[in-house]
Every structure is written in structure tokens, then in C-alpha cells.
Amino acid sequence: GGPAMGQVSQVVDAKAGQTVRFAGYVKTQGKLTATVGLMSYSADWKGLGFHAIRQARGDQDWLPFAGETTLLAGAARVAFAVMVDGDG
């Protein structure tokens, strides 16, 4: 146990101005925070922006999330990510 951070993501090709829709569920247990979001990248992997969708803290049963965002100028990829911070 102790402080830990981690993430899992899925990257897909995208285009600037494209609208991306997403939905799912997140569940947490213990002393941690999980953040679900989208990260836009340029063709050379420069981070262009992060769009947070949902946060869950502590003991939470399955929480739904859904969102829609339009990708920024210069976007060539988008990563759907879940980041976890807390005791691991």
C-alpha cells in the first residue's frame, strides 16, 4: 500500500473539429480518486488539451458518465483515459 498514480488509455485517430461522443461507467474503492477524460494530441503527439468528464472518490458503486466534445484545431488523435490517484 501507499501513494500511487496510474492511468489506462485508448488512443484513436481523429480530426480537428470532429465531435466525439463517449459513455461508460466508473467504480472506485478505497482511498483514491479516478478521473475519466479525453486528451487531444497533434500528429506529433503534442498534448493539445484535456476534457475531464467524471470524477469518482472513495467507495463508489458504478457511476455512469457520458459526454461530447469537439476536438481542438490541430488534433490528429484523441485518447480516452482513466487516471487513478490514491492508495495502491
Image: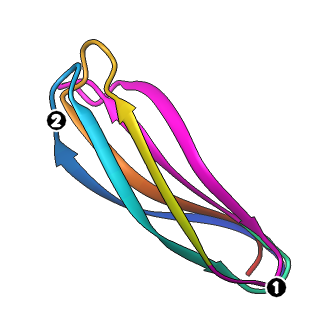
Q: Which image quadrant for residue 76?
A: top left
- Find residue 30 and name its label: 1
Name the foreground residue: 87 vs 27.
Answer: 27
Q: Is residue 57 left or right of residue 40?
A: right
Secondary element at image label 2: loop
Q: How many marks?
A: 2
Q: Which image quadrant for residue 64?
A: bottom right
Name the foreground residue: 5 vs 48.
Answer: 48
Q: Which image quadrant for residue 6?
A: bottom right
Write the residue at 53% across / 62% down: 65
Residue 50 percent coordinates (x, y): 50, 34
Figure quadrant of the N terminus: bottom right
Compared to 61, does 41 lie above or below?
above
> Which residue position holds label 2?
14
Residue 58 percent coordinates (x, y): 83, 77
Q: Is residue 62 left or right of residue 7?
A: right
Label 1, residues with CA under 10 Å away: few <14, some 14-19, many ≥20: few
Secondary element at image label 1: loop
Compared to 7, does 12 lie above or below?
above
Residue 75 percent coordinates (x, y): 25, 23
Label 2, residues with CA under 10 Å away: few <14, some 14-19, many ≥20: many
Write the residue at 62% across / 80% down: 27
Looking at numbered disc 2 in the image, what kind of residue is underneath it?
Answer: Ala
Write the residue at 85% across / 78% down: 31
Chain part drawn in magenta? 34-62
Write the residue at 34% across / 24% down: 46
| Chief secondary structure of the magenta portion | strand
Q: Residue furthest top?
A: 73
Looking at numbered disc 1 in the image, what kind of residue is underneath it?
Answer: Gly
